Amino acid sequence: MALSLRRIRAKKKIVSCTHCSEWMEVGALAMSVVCPKCRQRVIIEDYQIRSYHASRKLQTCGNVVVYKGATLSASTKAANMTVGGSVWGDVEVLGKLEVRKSGYMRGDVRASRLVVREGAMLEGYYEIGLMKIEPPRSKTGARVESPLT
Amino acid sequence: MTGANGEFSTTIGPDASFKGEITFEKGLRILGKFEGHIKAKGQLHIGEGAKVQADVDTGSAEIDGEMKGNLIAKRRIQLSSSSRLEGDLETARLEIADGAVFVGNCKVSPQSNGKPDPGQSGKKTVPTVGSVAAAKK
């Protein structure tokens, strides 16, 4: 038990601060951290929207999934995002944004990679593939997982 | 025309360069360079390595190469992983593969079939917190 806990603690991942874009190494199970550069609280956990979620901003270093039938109404920033429901608001994704055939997006979108399945409905200004983002290697030599798929 | 083997009746070859306006009925494949306007009801294919700088109004489009300009397709647009599109896009159905580069305004809805929007009757409205709370009551 103690050994497995130690293994879990040793796992790290690299995330980019949602406020200043600084890369930092955090524990794999951390939910939020304080950015060492800008001293702002950074949320790391994943979000799963299954019904209705409305807020001014939704910013996370983790992944966001909007399930079919669900609605997200917010300006969103995430590492990766999958949209099966409706998304209202601007979206910025460092990694991959996938819009499924049941997905509906209205707002401006910036992403490194975009996959759109036939049947999805989109409206807005799109900037895809212009961001060149590569997470740096771990300084401590620990095994780190990339946040970007 | 796209036959059973997927061939197009009109092809602009990889060593060809075309400037001007072109119209076609069934199918056009561009493998070289094109500059101007394209207006058609059929299918347009921009092959890998092709460079197109044009405003396009067509039935459906499949893009593997580079394109600059506005693209309207009544039925369907497909962007492959090697494609690069800089310009506005309007279609009824859109498919984008991982790796495609796209910069511009995007409008994908079944109403974007070249016909005028019938009073925006089928348009979704933004659900507000108040409306959801009222619905729960």
Image (cartoon, coloured by chain):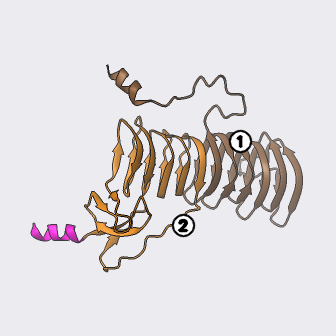
Chain colours: A orange, B brown
User: Which mark's residue is nearer the viewer, 2 or 1?
Assistant: 2
Q: Residue A78 location in percent, x, y?
A: 42, 54
Q: Main secondary structure of the magenta part?
A: helix
Mark 2 vs mark 1, CA separation in Å: 30 Å
Task: Please give the range of residues in magenta.
Answer: A1-10
- Observer-nearest residue: A101 or B70? B70
Which residue is disc 2 drawn over?
A132
Q: Residue B127 location in percent, x, y?
A: 45, 30
- Do marks 2 and 1 share a subunit? no
- Residue at x-position 61% and y-position 47%: A125
Mark 2 is on which residue type?
A: Lys
Mark 1 is on which residue type?
A: Ala
* Left or right of B135, for residue B56: right
In the rendered image, the vertical position of residue A15 relative to residue A75, given as above or below: below
- Residue at x-position 49% and y-position 31%: B126
* Left or right of A120, for residue B11: right
Q: Secondary structure at mark 2?
A: loop
Q: Which mark is residue A125?
A: none
Mark 2, chain letter? A
